[in-house]
Image (cartoon, helix red, strand yellow):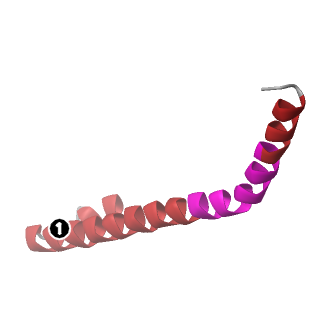
Amino acid sequence: MKYQEKEKTYADVQKQEQIAVLQKLDGELQQFSKEAQEKLAAKERELMQPMDEKINRAIKVVAEKHGF
């Protein structure tokens, strides 16, 4: 059952407690999401590094061939 449906039966103290619980869960979810995004970005950098290095070496070879 959703909070909004149950809210009508709660006393003010219960509402405040439930709001605090929901806010805590929301904060934890946001933190989890942030950490997951950071881990994903780090893994992407790790996986892309060898390709970036290979591309840069190829560019350097071509540039040297053409006198740049």
For the question of whether residue 10 can be seen, the reply is no
Q: Residue at x 70, y 57 (%)?
A: 49
The kind of residue tagged 1 is Lys
Query: Where's residue 3, x and y in %?
Result: 33, 64
In this orientation, does residue 45 appear?
Answer: yes
Tell me, yes or no, whether the highlighted magenta stretch contains residue 31: no
Q: Position of residue 13 (x, y in %)?
A: 9, 73
Q: Camera-side residue: 18 or 29?
A: 29
Image position of 1 (left or right of 16): right
Can you identify the residue that label 1 sits on?
A: 15
Which corner quadrant of the image does residue 9 belong to?
Answer: bottom left
Position of residue 64 relative to residue 4, above or below, is: above
Image quadrant holding the N terminus, namely bottom left
* Horizontal side of residue 32 vs 14, given as left or right: right
Tell me the chief SS of the magenta region.
helix
Name the quarter where the C terminus is drawn: top right
* Identity of the residue drawn at 87% across and 25% down: 66
x then y, percent, for residue 28: 36, 70
The part of the chain drawn in magenta is 40-56
Question: Element under label 1?
Answer: helix
Give residue 8's position: percent from left, percent from top. 23, 62
**Residue at image point 83% right, 34% down:** 64
Left or right: 4, with 46 as reference point: left
Rendered view: 39 above or below 67: below
Front in this rendered view, residue 40 or 3: 40
Q: State the image quarter where residue 42 is shown.
A: bottom right
Nearer to us in this view, 49 or 68: 68
Q: Residue at x 29, y 67 (%)?
A: 22
